[in-house]
Structure formats: C-alpha cells, structure tokens
Amino acid sequence: MGLEDHPTVKKYREKKAEGSDLPEPEKLDSDWLKRLVLNAGADDIGLIGIDHPGIADQRQDILEIFPRTKSLISIMCRLNRDNIRSASRAISDLEFLQTFEKVNSVARAVVAFLNEKGLRAMNSSSGFPMDMAKWPGKMWPISHKPVAVAAGLGVMGLNRLLLHPRFGSFNVLGTILFDREVSAYDSPLEFTPCIDCKLCASVCPVGAVGADGSFNFATCMTHNYRDRLGGFQDWIERVVSSKDVKSYRKKVRDSETVSMWQSLSYGICNKSSYCMAVCPAGESVIGPFLDDRKGFVEEVVKPLQNKTESIYVVPGSDGEAHVVRRFPHKTVKRIGNGLRPNSAIGFLQSLPIVFQPHQSEGIDATYHFSFTGEEDCSGTVVIRNMTIEVKE
C-alpha cells in the first residue's frame, strides 16, 4: 500500500479539502480569540506580536521552544484575595495551587481547541515545572510578567508583582504561543495601579521589598521558597550531613520536616507572599483601604507583621539584619539558599542577584576578575554607595 492510500493520509487529505471553520483571513480576529479564551475560564486576556519590544530580551528563548510563534496570548486568572490575606499560609497556599492549576487548564483547553482547528499553538506552565537542568540560571521558558505588561494586563508594582487595573496583585499569569497574527494587538497601560502606599515594604519579613524601590531577590527567594529549589537543596544537604537522627533534629525541627513532606505531597507551599496579601491596588480591591485605612491595617497588615513564625535567611545577609531589627518576635533560621554558580560567567551574572546592599555599607572598591581554562572570560565589579555594577 502506497503512502497516499493509507487511511490516515486519506483522512487528512479529505479534512484539508473540507477546510477549517476558523475565520479564513490569515490574521485571526482578535475579538473572536479573546472570547474563546474568556469562555475557557480566563478573567482577562491580552495579545501581542512576537516582535513586540517589551519582550525583545526573551524573543530568542520563545522561538527556541516554538519556532512558529507569531503571536502571544497573555492569560490572567484572579486569586480570591481573602484567602491570600489569611494569616494561615495553608489557606493562602490552597488558593495559589488551585489558581495555578486553573491557568494551566485554561491555556491547555485553548491550545487544544486551536490545534483541533488546524492552528499550531503551545503553552508553558504558569509556574512549575521548569527546566531544572538550567538551574541556577533561567529555568522558565517564558517570563509571563513582561508578556502581560506588554499586553496591557498591568504594570509591575513595588512588590514586583503584576498589578492588574481591576484585580491588583491578586492574579496568576500564563502565556500561549501560536502561529498566526491577529487583527489587533493590545498596548501597555498608560498608568500604574500602584498607589505608592508601601504596605508591601512594611510587611515583608526579610525586607526584600525596599520602600526606595529596590528589591532583594535572593533574600525573598531564601525565605519564601524554603520548601523548593535551593531551599530544598539545602534541606537535603542537612539530611546527608547529619551523623544520625539526633544530629538531624538539632538542625531541622519536626515541623520543618513535615512542611517539606507537605510540599512534596500536595503542592509547593510558600512561607510569605505577604507583599501580595496587603496590596490594595486595583479597582475591585482598593475600597476597604480607602474607606478605612486604619481598619485595613489592623485587619490585614498587622496580623502578618505580628505573626510568630520562622524566617529563613542566609547568615550575615540583609534579610537576617532586617528580621532582628524589625521583627524581633519572629525566629531567625539560618540556612543556605542553593544559589551557587556553576560557571565563571554564571558567577559574574549572579553577583547583582545575590548582592546584599546593606552589608556593603562603607565599601568603595573595584575588582577585576580574569578566568582561564575551560572558560576564558573576564569582568570588572564595582561596589560603591551600596550598589554593585558588573562590567564585561
């Protein structure tokens, strides 16, 4: 039997001859596409082209995972804010887990529909899984926040969360790539929903969110991601380095061990996300803050500030100093965060990420590094005025 006589081939030829029931023009109708995504369960959607300048720095990464990409769909599903605001992280984590699953489900349903109609499309995970072989580098195939900003779904806030004009910081994002242009693309917002209240800075247990606009990624990750990535790596190393059970229990409390079990069994859990919980930005969120600011602080902010809990920090870091100074009633737990570069270039690239500004106070120095051997590269590091600059 020749290839053209095969039942599968004949069926494909027949279906192709019948044509698709999608709109005929080469460009998909943007309104039709938006209705499709909203009907699938998304709360908002934005559209951009692959050549949008707002995603220029990840264009190559996107084309590597899906070379046919011509357009991107930014998907947003809202979080139930009172769950996130609860002093119980179990209630907050449940909301995160369910909403991440919803975003992935919506994206998958849209991709399946487009595939059935003859289009090529794909979606990446809203959060995890990621490409762990690239750790500690860029493991996520698509950076959802810049896509959402370019597509007009919001603006990055002081807390480094996407602030949606209606739902504020209470959202989870996803992205779909597909092989067609659309009739109309979206534009970034012309204003920021952030009201500059700085509540996110006041509630962060490790001081990662600076009132001056700075953000300490490593400090944030060390605490909030204790049960995953480098935090999990640190825990494993504590297990294997313990001589016996008694030695292990001196390093890790029983509650910490079962916390790891819970994250492994039921889904990744956070230790904070307080910067999201207290954020009043967004039309459907801001009311209680405007109507009674003192009451809002008493009900939402102070329970998180006053909570007795363990805060995970790298020894000698800005995070440790912040907890001791700002939240003395919280318990400092000194750990490693697993952020170890695996190359000379990785070392230079990681310096701005792991840099601890307040630990550098009074330092005015320039260092030049030259690497030879398996890697031949160099870099100059300037530390001055509690900032770091790395030059090639």
Image (tube, grey):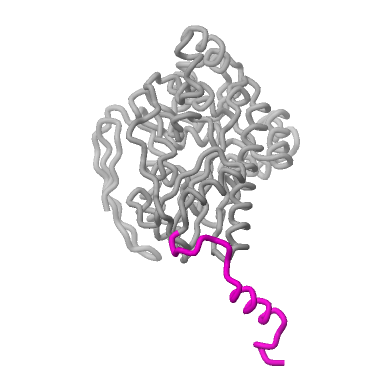
| Viewer-nearest residue: 356 or 176 | 176
| Viewer-nearest residue: 373 or 101 | 101
The total number of labels drawn is 0
Q: Look at 36% across and 41% down and name the residue there.
A: 188
| Viewer-nearest residue: 262 or 88 | 88
- Residue 197 seen in the figure: yes
Q: Look at 57% across and 49% down and name the residue there.
A: 36
Based on the picture, tell me whether residue 7 belongs to the magenta stretch: yes
Based on the picture, tell me whether residue 206 belongs to the magenta stretch: no
Residue 55 position within the rendered picture, expressed as x and y whole percent measured from the top left: 38, 51
- Residue 162 lies left or right of residue 125; in this view the side is left
**Is the residue 313 above or below the residue 45 in the image?**
above
| Viewer-nearest residue: 103 or 241 | 103
Q: Residue furthest bottom?
A: 1
- Residue 64 seen in the figure: no
Residue 145 position within the rendered picture, expressed as x and y whole percent measured from the top left: 45, 42
- Residue 59 lies left or right of residue 307; in this view the side is left
Q: Which residues are magenta?
A: 1-27
Say which quadrant the N terminus sits in. bottom right
| Residue 181, quarter of the rendered image | bottom left
**Is the residue 164 above or below the residue 350 in the image?**
above
Residue 151 position within the rendered picture, expressed as x and y whole percent measured from the top left: 41, 44
Residue 253 position within the rendered picture, expressed as x and y whole percent measured from the top left: 69, 28
Q: Look at 55% across and 58% down and name the residue there.
A: 122
Q: Residue furthest right?
A: 245
